[in-house]
Image (cartoon, rainbow, N blue to C red):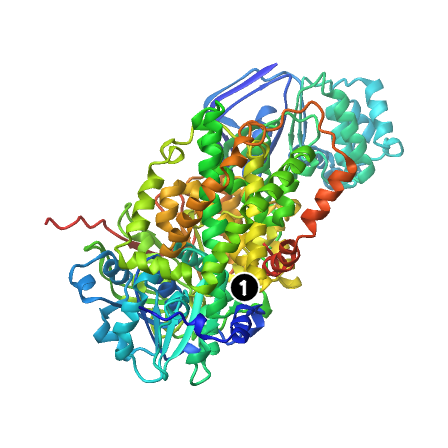
Amino acid sequence: MSNNYFNTLPLREQLEQLGKCRFMSIDEFSDGVEALKGKKMVVIGCGAQGLAQGMNLRDSGCDVSYALREAAIAEKRQSWKNASENGFVVGTYEELIPTADVVLNLTPDKQHTSVVNAIMPLMKQGACLSYSHGFNIVEEGMKIREDLTVIMVAPKCPGSEVRNEYVRGFGVPTLIAVHEDNDPKGEGLALAKAYAAGTGGHKAGVLMSSFIAEVKSDLMGEQTILCGMLQTGSLLCFDKMVEEGIDPGYASKLIQYGWETITEALKYGGVTNMLDRLSNPAKIKAFDLSEELKQIMRPLYNKHQDDIIDGTFSRTMMEDWANDDKNLLGWRAETAETAFEKTPAGDVEISEQEYFDNGILMVAMVKAGVELAFETMTAAGIIADSAYYESLHETPLIANTIARKKLYEMNATISDTAEYGCYLYNHACLPLLADFMKDIKTDVIGKGLDLEDTGVDNARLIEVNTALRSHPVEAIGAVLRGHMADMKKIV
Amino acid sequence: MNIRLDNLTVNFDDRFQLDQINWQLDDTQHWVITGANGSGKSALAAVLAGAGDNLSGTIEGLPARVGLVSFEAQAELIERERKKDDADIMDVISEGTPVHEILSEGGRNPALVSQLVEMFKLESLLNRSFRKLSTGESRKVILIRALASEPELLVLDEPFDGLDAHTLEMLQQYLATLVETVPMVLVLNRFDEFPDFVTHIAYVDHGRLAYQIDRNDKRAYNELYQLLHLKTTDLEVPAADPETAIPRLDPAQPLVKLNSINITYDGHRIIDSLDWTIERNQHWQLSGPNGSGKTGLLSLITGDHPQCYVNDIFVFGFQRGKGESIWQIKQFIGYVSTALQWEYKVGTGLRNVIISGFYDSIGLYTKATDRQKKIADEWLALLGMSDRADTPFNKLSYGDQRLLLIARAMVKHPPLLILDEPCLGLDDMNRQLVLALIEKICAASETSVLYVNHHAEDKIKGIENYLKLEKREPAAS
């Protein structure tokens, strides 16, 4: 079994690595793909992410080919089709890896150990190995040959968007890192920057982070607020509405599209703006509910973060990997059987504002989840910038997946690590909120407040507004959204 | 009064012909006839005053008294006066007919004549010979004659031309007082001169009555405004931006050279061993049925097709697949297609959409320079959209979006402009708009145009090279 790399480091270094995250200026990318010119890039894995990155890099003038397992080529599997129909040279590991100056490992996390073990002996002296996720290095403690440079370039979007944004002349926000134990020639950063530029990421904003910060914050975000909270919230809100006599079709639609609608407001103006979309009495109600939720769920968020930091989470998940994904697949099947999943969205018109007005509890859940994830991450030594991206920033992406695919497909779409964590969270959170849900009525989920008079107490409103606006996730959010706006919404 | 023209074809001394006009006017309507120079708008107006020889079709309901003001009517009167001058043969100095006589001809209402003389401030000229009046003065006389004839229909061909601001305002106000009693047909070239009382617009193009529009139909009204603007504006296609100039190409090399090109999907070959060279300053038309590979072929040139890396393609000085980036290729190409329009789903303002053409991006991700903004504004002026510079692109009509994307494609003056079915999905008026813009571009720049279309009638002047693709049926398996 593997050795957790993070746990081998002294606390001082752990903290230093967790605290790495810097928004880079576009001026730092003025060399473009120069550092990769004349170098041979070989991609391993040709799923959506692998294909998108390879196409972008090639269109930026890089020399890209694909190495696949012999079986994938012989059986003309989808990965082989993806690469060869798009005009790429495709070959086996043995054929292509020895020629590569940069190897891009874009296989799923679960395969990293076997893939890296297979290619490492084939790699040429002094070449570069690149990851899009640091799990293999940080959690599995994979040791990479000392002469090899190890970097990470992680576009923070699904593969289809990585490609589409590039074609538009833009890119997607991207995280880069250099594994300091493997930077023998000191060229890791230059390669990572050129790679990010080749995928167009530099136009949308690049974060300079570390393998450790990326893994520990990414795992935390995805299993709590991003996937876990939205899954748990969906199930609880749906069952409650049906129990209270709301039409199941309406309830299903309110949830399926509601997360996307309310987190769109979150994306533009943070938690503050999301709550500002509510009437004053509804805002105060959502605030109170979220305070209650935060109190109930805080121990759970702490446990998730603790398990991630000390490696308990990755160890149990890898045990399940070794056990043919028994837990994962069982939980996935259970998700398919939930009432929410089985009730299609009704053919009813719901206006944009109605999603807020009738989804006060959902707003409260998003607020509680975002703030708790952010608070827990920063308390564990993760810098606010990383914590923001891995909580608030990515929530709308998952909400969008639920809008398109509901829960089962959402889980099948996200990474295995995210899905496993999501189920862990969901199983712990459902019973945790059982009592809380008993007091919930349709005024906060399904029908909206039924008030003749929307007046509120001045002092209370000021108190709520101040609390919303002074939360630390709002401060860093304003700064980072500002950077992003400079780059993106010149439009 | 109800005038009705059915399939009317009228000849004017073999100089001009109006073809198959179908038109109805009743006495509650006030029309403007408009169109480009030489389109036949004056001829159509003159038909209402009985001019021309009817070759076929019918015209019914013309009133007996039509008050006509036009350059032709003015010229006719001047000519008549000139003929009266017998000085050359009689050896007497002819004074010609004084203005007051011209005005009282035909038993016009003397009180009304005096009132109008006062309004047009012609009192001091009443005894002057008509022949000795300036053009503007004689125009006023003609106007008074027409207005004082107590007409059942007023036909005013460019009545505001050559009038000073004061007179113009007076005349417009006076006409407004007549709307309840006299139906009017005005020939006007500028939308900003259309009086408020006008209820309908007739657009004449090449001797045909192309469009009849109810003024309350805002959309059609705006489209017509743009069409007239594009057909009549003196504005030129704006120049390129010297600061972001496209690198110079070797004039000896072709723009595009495709060698034995293949495109294959799922084992089926869509394009088979095709050679194609586009030299500088050549215009091409590419045609072929759906599925014949037109768009695939184009995207090999633009670099959007992944199989451009497995074909022998030379474009703008680059042999593809040798480490160039697609942005190096795209800078030489302006591109417009329906697919691009579908992709271009942004809430960006119109000015930014045009500027995005400098960067070949969908949306704008770079701060624009002042010069780029100025060029974009010049394009908006050319398109007649100056007042909409900050309107979100996705709020535009489909046809306007297309016009704007053509401007976006041309803003950098690319060596190659690819128009992939630029009229697809457009109604006739928008089609006219697009073609008018393309013709303006072709006439004014050194860009080679590569035009892809289905509609044989959408011809563009100056295209002399043709490539026709055939659909390849899948080989039997």
Q: Position of residue A170 (x, y in %)?
A: 49, 60
Q: Which residue lies at the image location 68% right of the left edge and 33% below the top edge?
A: A281
Q: Nearer the viewer, residue A61 or B54?
A: A61
Q: Is residue B228 left or right of residue B285?
A: right
Q: Position of residue A442 (x, y in %)?
A: 55, 27
SS at mark 1?
loop
Q: Position of residue B112 (x, y in %)?
A: 82, 20
Whether residue B209 is visible here, answered yes or no, is yes
Whether residue B42 is visible here, answered yes or no, is no
Q: Which residue lies at the image location 60% right of the left edge and 41% below the top edge?
A: A292
**Chain for disc number 1:** A
Q: Nearer the viewer, residue A351 or B202?
A: A351
Quadrant housing the C terminus of chain A: bottom right
Q: Nearer the viewer, residue B150 or A96?
A: A96
Amino acid identity at mark 1: Gly
Q: Relative to residue A255, is residue B437 depicted above or below?
A: below
Q: Is residue B281 left or right of residue A31?
A: left
Q: Position of residue A426 (x, y in %)?
A: 43, 45
Q: Which residue lies at the image location 43% right of the left edge and 75% below the top edge?
A: B250
- Res B82 → quadrant: top right
Quadrant housing the N terminus of chain A: bottom left
Disc 1 crowd rating (10 Å Cα; few below 14, some 14-19, many 20+) is: many
Q: Is residue A84 left or right of residue A411?
A: left
The residue at the far right in this view is B124
Q: Which residue is mark 1?
A: A205
Q: How many marks?
A: 1
- Res A365 → quadrant: top right
Q: Relative to residue B336, is residue B245 depicted above or below?
A: below
